[in-house]
Amino acid sequence: MNSIEKISELLAKKAEIALGGGKEKQDKQKQNGSMTARERIDALLDAGSFVEVGAFISARDEETAADGVVTGYGSIDGRLVYVYSQDVTVLGGAMGEMYANKINKIVDMAAKMGAPVIGMLDSNGVRLSDGPRVQRAMGRVLSSFANISGVVPHISIVFGNCAGGSAIAAAMSDFVIMNAKNGKMFVTGPDIIEATEGSAPAVDAKGSVNKNGNAHFIGEDDSSCIEIAKLLLSYIPSNNLSDAFEYETADDLNRSCDILNDVDSIGDVRVVVAEIADDKAFFEVQADYAEEASIGFIRINGSVVGIVATSGDEISSRAAQKMERFVRFCDCYNTPILTVTDVEGFTASASEETWGLARKSAELMYAFVEATVPKVNLIVKKAYGTAYTLMNSKQGGADLIFAYPTAEMAPLPPAAGVGVLYSERLKAGESREALEQEYIETEASIYNAAKLGCIDDIIVPAESRARIAAAFEMLKSKRAGAITRKHDNMPQ
């Protein structure tokens, strides 16, 4: 066989591998409104940039096209990323020994190069026929994901089933995006749980977003999931030693936020966040989960800032955990944090205590205390009790704290504070409503907090964008160290 014939043979083999489990299975996949494993990669990456690694790898005991997972690297907007895409047409996308080795190879390369990893998940689990080999292989994959956490960003896109070890792998990533129609994420099959307990868990995309918090975003189809991943990537750096990309903005840095001068009429903290942001754009994360807290990204003068905000409601255990993990992500990847605070206390209920409100709240305090990135707090309305202490207070390590003149700060909210401080006056028949107003104007006055150094300045709300931008500009050169230790023992 001459060289021309060998090249022809090579191209024929590559064409056969590209068909995965066969054209018939790929056509069926497309008829269900899904892209194939390779089409998903092509839609994600810059045109022509994908370089496949390990295309000829197959299972030890049978021919499996790319062994059911397409792996390699390419670019998104010119930026290096590593990808793996599970091919459900090959043995249901189930993970085998060689399959896992391919993923580990890509993850190791990503860590060495300092580039994000994006996993495209569509699998029915693991290959039981591989026996203990697949347990060993899955363990290596999970170990690899643990090792890159905090080193390079890891995004998972769940297009179809994400079962067993794959669900754990997805949960280990920094962000999970799910297809609204076909995405399902579970460790134990819902059929098994329903047969055992009489009801099925919320494993679909909607349940994973607004019930259990496993997912961060929902896309209506494969294409929209991929677009979300691209947008998300534009806000985060490539690794823990670099900063997020800066973008040019035409938005005036000193733009007046006049609507904020009437902040009492604003019921949604997202309005405040948007007024501060470049082009009033807030890219929210987990918007439908634990809605009393809002997290996400904005840009200020082109630079990315992480947002942790509350809207006046009480903090629940789920909200505390949601905020905690986001703070830790921002700190891992050199992203300054702006806290927009309006909080009255903690959710008072038996279910919250049972679920672990104390532990989850402790996690939030740990996260802020340990974060060494620039941290600014803007108190817009209420800042009461221990709930405020957790929200990037001075004790939590905030570099600068600003407050609006409408803000209130005290150890207890008015209803409880009046009951303690003004109990005799209540017994004498004075109006509780009047006493609560007096409490707000005296005990909870933000000027008292300013006198004690609990805040750094009381600002005109319309000046929020300019003042916060100036604060982060000043904090760009912040240096912070930590006490030497192996690791903390944060409650979980």
Image (cartoon, grey):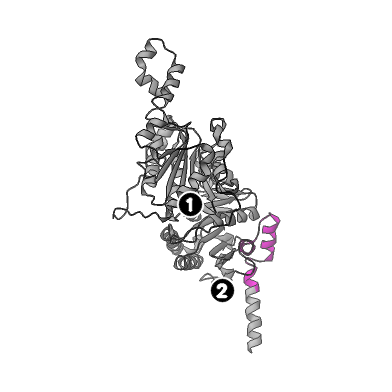
User: Decide: marks 1, 2 in contact (CB < 8 A)?
Assistant: no
The location of residue 221, given as percent across then percent down, is 65, 52
Find residue 56 and name its label.
Answer: 2
Residue located at (35% from left, 47% from top)? 490
Q: Which mark is residue 171?
A: 1
- For residue 40, which numbered disc appears in the image? none
Instruction: Indicate the position of residue 84 as horizontal and vertical percent values.
Output: 54, 63
Give the quarter of the figure containing the C terminus. top left
Q: State whether residue 223 is above or below residue 381.
A: below
Residue 470 image point, x, y percent:
48, 48
* Figure check: 67 above or below 310: below
Let me know if residue 30 is in the magenta part.
yes
Furthest residue in direction bottom, as rendered: 2
Q: Earlier in the sequence, mark 1 or mark 2?
A: 2
Please indicate, yes or no, whether residue 195 appears anywhere in the rendered image.
Answer: no
The kind of secondary structure the magenta stretch mainly shows is helix
Is residue 50 toward the left or the right of residue 430 in the image?
right
Q: Is residue 214 magenta?
A: no
SS class, disc 2: loop
The residue lying furthest to the left in this view is: 484
Amino acid type shown at disc 2: Phe
Bounds of the magenta span? 15-44
Q: Quadrant of residue 458?
A: top left
Quadrant showing the N terminus: bottom right
Residue type of the residue flagged with mark 1:
Ala
